[in-house]
Image: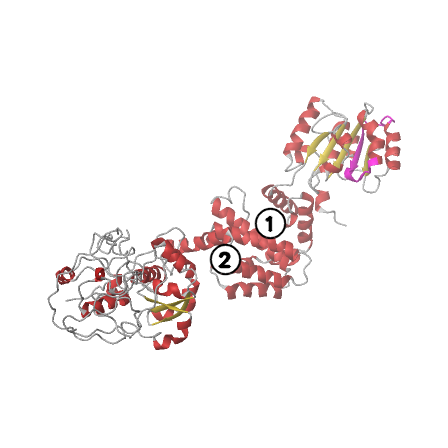
């Protein structure tokens, strides 16, 4: 029967122990100096040389030249304690896994007092010392603390924390470690060369990975491959078939598909894994190892020379290209997903389904809101920009948007103005005809709203031309659902211009969007006209332009009028009867100086007739449905019409000054105010106004227009 490789090539001296120089060098020094301790504790993973080192220590202590670090190998003690020797009566090896009770400890204690038969020391090697019970350790405590001069204890364990602390504190503790991959590969190559068996180079990384750093496990795997090798030696195909390792071609196809974001290729690789009979969990483990290698190759270009990555020469170029295409952010996210998925696949009844779910998560970084997914998306954008090809899917966070011109300008058409309506155009000084008309027009009654310190149209700073932005979406793509969705943003923009208007607009609801007009409804009828004011409408339209782009008209109706939007919600000054042509201007009689009135704030700039502003909280009285001009020429000496009558008493508007000022507030002692003097109060005498001017004023209040001469 052939002897196993790990037994045939077991080290006989400390010099032959590989990968544990941090333990063997101090022991060799102590042996040569003669500083021998009465108890040693060797700990570390399985198969790293703990028991073999304990036997070498006993051989070195009992050699005729000893204690020495290099036994002669020819004396009776060295021959008996050789790896395949018969053993020595003075060296007792006890397996604590089956002899860890208190009775076994008492028997060992009784035997310890006897002097050695033919050797210098009696050595008790207790393997798997963590299996000794607490009572057993307590039985050995006294003999370990104060042993005879000829007695040496060596405890070997994989779990030193389970050794009784009072025992551990009385020993010299030497921790063993797993063997580095480079050391294990050199050991395998030397053993295969000694055995005279040809092994393909790609097989060694598979064996090293299967051994996991344990020398005994690695030699057991290689022993299995050598036993099944044919005349051609150990081939790569035979190795992956026997070890159950995933073929590197499947790993490469999976990584290439992930780098190209090729979902069909990813799931085709999963199907090939299942069809080949591979374990999905083992495939995920091998894929995680590949991600680890790619990360190291990306971070450390000479990782192969340093021994950080073990790969064949032909596969190293492929792995380097994969690391360049994926990037560190994508590799890190893929590795974390696979690592978490391995725990979920343990004990799963459908490992293939879980593997496919892992692939779906790796392919969809946009489905996650984590920072890792965001980094992967940003990394993909940077790679596209660096490559200079392919459209960028999403803008890089923090980058400025690329200015773009309107479509008409790009096609060579003359540039068009950004603002089409006069109410949305930048403030301009009045024309000569307008100033002449204003000079001839009598000053209308002032209201607190008209004299408010709000900056008039002329004094407002001209808004700078807007920076070129991306073309706004077509109007047919914006519906009422879009406006409602952007409602919080719209309110924020409105509040930037007028906080009071934003407060009034809070309860408003977008009703309809058609032909560039946005219709709002408000439950409070008193606020509908205030929201329909020209200034407020311009502010809302500006906010719509900032949020949705394009030019918009704004109309606010009450909830009751929402059902009658098809008919226009009643007659408006724009659709009512047109005023009749005014007769020639007649000479104005000298007017009496008005009585003193409460002080009012004056307006320094050109007065602009306006409706109620957003700062006024006084409810508005009803207005006439259709303004009509009065009789052109009343007879001389005829009494003026009653000024205190309600505007709706006869359906006509007086030819003189409007009964209710544009602000909707009756002037004390003026038109529309019935005081103690009554309607015939002589202080209320004012010069008549031209009916055409009255109609123009009403049109300006409702439509925001301006007379152009």
- Which quadrant, please, contains the C terminus? bottom left
Q: Position of residue 625 (x, y in %)?
A: 31, 73
Q: Residues within 10 Å of mark 2 (few under 14, many from 20)?
A: some
Q: Residue at x 23, y 58 (%)?
A: 426
Q: Element at badge 1?
A: helix
Q: Tell which tag, 2 or 1, sits nearer the viewer.
A: 2
**Which span is picked out in magenta?**
113-134
Identify the coloring. secondary structure
Based on the displayed image, in which of its 4 quarters is residue 462 positioned? bottom left
In whole angstroms, how far apart are the C-alphas of marks 2 and 1?
A: 36 Å
Q: Which residue is mark 2?
A: 365
- For marks 2 and 1, the one nearer the N-term is 1
Q: Residue at x 72, y 34 (%)?
A: 42
468 to the left or right of 82: left
Is residue 408 or residue 240 the one in the foreground?
Answer: 408
Q: Which residue is mark 1?
A: 204
Q: Position of residue 474 (x, y in %)?
A: 34, 68
Is residue 198 or residue 109 the one in the foreground?
Answer: 109
């Amino acid at each position: 029967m052939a002897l196993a490789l790990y037994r045939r090539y077991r080290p006989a001296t400390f010099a032959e122990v590989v990968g544990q120089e941090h333990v063997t060098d101090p022991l060799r020094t102590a042996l040569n100096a003669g500083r021998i301790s009465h108890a040693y504790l060797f700990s570390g993973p399985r198969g790293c040389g703990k028991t073999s080192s304990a036997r070498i220590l006993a051989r070195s202590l009992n050699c005729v030249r000893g204690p020495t670090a290099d036994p002669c190998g020819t004396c009776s003690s060295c021959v008996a304690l050789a790896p395949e020797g018969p053993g020595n009566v003075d060296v007792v090896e006890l397996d604590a896994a089956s002899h860890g009770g208190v009775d076994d400890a008492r028997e060992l204690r009784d035997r310890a007092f006897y002097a050695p038969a033919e050797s210098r020391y009696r050595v008790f090697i207790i393997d798997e010392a963590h299996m000794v019970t607490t009572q057993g350790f307590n039985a050995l405590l006294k003999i370990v603390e104060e042993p005879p001069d000829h007695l040496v204890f060596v405890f070997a364990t994989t779990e030193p924390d389970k050794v009784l602390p009072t025992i551990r504190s009385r020993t010299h503790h030497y921790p063993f470690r797993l063997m580095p991959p480079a050391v294990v590969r050199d050991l395998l190559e030397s053993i295969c060369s000694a055995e005279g068996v040809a092994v393909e180079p790609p097989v060694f990384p598979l064996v090293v990975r299967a051994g996991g750093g344990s020398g005994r496990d690695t030699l057991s795997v290689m022993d299995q491959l050598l036993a099944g090798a044919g005349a051609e030696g150990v081939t790569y195909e035979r190795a992956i078939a026997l070890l159950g390792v995933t073929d590197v071609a499947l790993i490469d196809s999976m990584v290439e598909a992930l780098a190209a974001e090729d979902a069909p290729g990813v799931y085709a690789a999963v199907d090939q894994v299942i069809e080949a009979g591979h374990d999905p969990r083992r495939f995920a483990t091998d894929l995680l190892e590949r991600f680890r290698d790619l990360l190291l190759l990306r971070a450390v270009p000479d990782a192969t020379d340093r021994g950080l990555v073990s790969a064949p020469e032909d596969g190293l170029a492929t792995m380097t290209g994969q690391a360049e295409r994926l990037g560190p952010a994508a590799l890190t996210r893929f590795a974390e997903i696979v690592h978490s998925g391995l725990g979920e696949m343990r004990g799963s009844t459908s490992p293939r389904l879980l593997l496919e779910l892992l692939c779906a998560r790796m392919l969809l970084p946009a489905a996650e809101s984590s920072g890792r997914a965001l980094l992967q998306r940003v990394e993909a954008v940077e790679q596209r920009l660096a490559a200079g090809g392919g459209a960028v899917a999403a803008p890089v966070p923090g980058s400025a948007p690329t200015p773009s011109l309107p479509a008409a300008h790009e096609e060579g058409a003359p540039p068009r103005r950004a603002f089409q309506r006069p109410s949305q155009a930048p403030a301009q000084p009045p024309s000569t005809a307008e100033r002449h008309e204003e000079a001839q027009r009598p000053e209308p009654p002032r209201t607190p709203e008209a004299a408010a310190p709000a900056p008039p149209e002329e004094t407002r700073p001209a808004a700078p031309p807007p920076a070129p932005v991306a073309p706004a979406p077509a109007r047919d793509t914006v519906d009422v659902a879009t406006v409602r969705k952007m409602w919080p943003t719209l309110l924020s923009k409105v509040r930037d211009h007028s906080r009071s208007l934003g407060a009034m607009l809070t309860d408003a609801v977008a009703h309809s969007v058609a032909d560039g007009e946005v219709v709002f409804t408000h439950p409070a009828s008193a606020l509908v006209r205030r929201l329909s004011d020209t200034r407020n409408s311009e502010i809302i339209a500006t906010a719509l332009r900032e949020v949705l782009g394009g030019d918009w008209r704004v109309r606010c109706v009450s909830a009751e009028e929402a059902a009658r939007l098809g008919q226009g919600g009643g007659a408006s000054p724009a659709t009512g009867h047109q005023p009749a042509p005014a007769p020639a201007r007649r000479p104005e009689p000298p007017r009496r100086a008005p009585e003193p009135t409460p002080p009012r704030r004056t307006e320094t700039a050109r007065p602009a007739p306006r409706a109620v502003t957003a700062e006024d909280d006084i409810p508005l009285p009803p207005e006439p449905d259709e303004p009509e001009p009065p009789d052109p020429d009343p007879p001389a000496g005829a009494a003026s019409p009653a000024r205190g009558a309600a505007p709706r008493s006869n359906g006509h508007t007086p030819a003189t000054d409007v009964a209710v000022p544009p602000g909707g507030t009756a002037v004390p002692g003026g038109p529309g105010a019935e005081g103690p003097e009554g309607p015939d109060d002589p202080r209320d005498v004012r010069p008549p106004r031209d009916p055409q001017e009255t109609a123009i004023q009403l049109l300006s209040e409702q439509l925001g227009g301006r007379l152009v001469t």
